[in-house]
Amino acid sequence: MTLSVLSLAARPWIVGHRGAAGEAPENSLESLLLAVEQGADMIELDLQLTADGSLVACHDWTLERMGGIELTIEETPLDALREVEISGEFRTPRARQFVSTLSSILALLPPEMPLNLELKRRLADPAVLAARLAEAVASRDQLLISSFDWLLLAEVRRWLPKLPLAPLGGRSANPRELIATAVLLDAWSVHCSRTLVDHELMELAAARPVLTYTVNELAEAQELFALGVAGVFSDFPGRLRRQIEAA
Ligand code: G3P
Ligand code: MG
């Protein structure tokens, strides 16, 4: 099967984590645009399904940390979420940022910009989430869908057979299970915590690119690239790029 187009610049890749989360409110339009400006090779953002079926960019299950209000994304309709300002730790005067829908993000970012959409799900129906994703991304290339929820990725594969996928493994993931899942899903890449990367994992991954999170320091990025890691998710994509170029 031929996957949809996903073409990135030469390795190693610097992926903007939640946009440029070290310098702007994570997953906000401002953060995503900043990562584009800073020359990220790809931009990662977290997506969840609202109670009324919209996909919105948000990492946490609630808006407490970013918006100061205990609203659970998956239990709240879009209109209520949209009203909450998400400054997080960035409370300096700036354009106010609000929870954004996937559709508004896709409309704003350049169509050729590679995006890694990380799906987060706790309560949502996997089939509904996959169906909503399929509607939202219908006409866009340069997408890579990842998730810690591997069964959800299998559902996404049913709805979007050609979309590049990546299983995500956290700190406590079993590397063999992670790679076996990548093989089963015919995944484009494998994403994992930097703490999981060692020679064994790299051997198991074979030709499949391994991308690791979250890497903000040059020395650590260099160590991972030397092990064969293809890309890193960074909160400071511009700074890391400059440091790599200057090294
Ligand atoms: O997708 C890579 C990374 O973002 C996974 O962890 O918790 O930052 O979404 P998290
Ligand atoms: Mg993420």
Image (spheres, grey):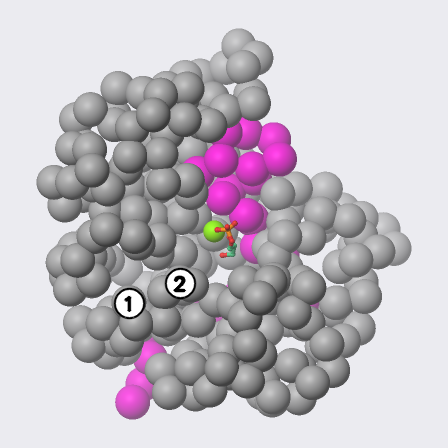
Task: Indicate yes or no whether the magenta region holds residue 4.
Answer: yes
User: How many labels sit on residues?
Assistant: 2
Q: Residue furthest top?
A: 93
Q: Nearer the viewer, residue 44 or 129?
A: 129
Instruction: Return the x and y of residue 221 as percentages of the image width and height.
Output: 75, 59
Quadrant in the picture for residue 1: bottom left
In this view, 11 is above or below 16: below
Task: Indicate yes or no whether the magenta region holds residue 139.
Answer: no
Instruction: Return the x and y of residue 116 as percentages of the image width and height.
Output: 43, 58
Q: Which residue is mark 2?
A: 147
Instruction: Return the x and y of residue 3 as percentages of the image width and height.
Output: 33, 79
Label 1 vs 2, first from the N-terminus = 2
Query: Residue at left 62%, top 35%?
Result: 22
In this view, 191 is above or below 85: below
Locate residue 51 relative to residue 69 in the image: left or right.
Answer: left
In this view, 91 is above or below 198: above
Locate residue 107 relative to residue 204 in the image: left or right.
Answer: left
| Tag 1: amino acid | Leu
Q: Nearer the viewer, residue 224 or 193?
A: 193
Residues at badges 1 and 2 in contact (C-beta under 8 Å)?
yes
Q: Nearer the viewer, residue 127 or 242?
A: 127
Q: Which residue is mark 1?
A: 152
Locate residue 82 relative to residue 232 in the image: left or right.
Answer: left
Q: Secondary structure at mark 2?
A: strand
Q: CA distance from mark 1 to mark 2?
A: 8 Å
Query: Residue at left 16%, top 33%?
Result: 77
Crowding at dot 1, Cα within 10 Å, few <14 / some 14-19 / many 20+, comes out as many
Predominant secondary structure, magenta span:
loop
Q: Secondary structure at mark 1?
A: helix
Magenta part of the chain: 1-27
| Tag 2: amino acid | Ser
Residue 97 showing in the rendered view? no
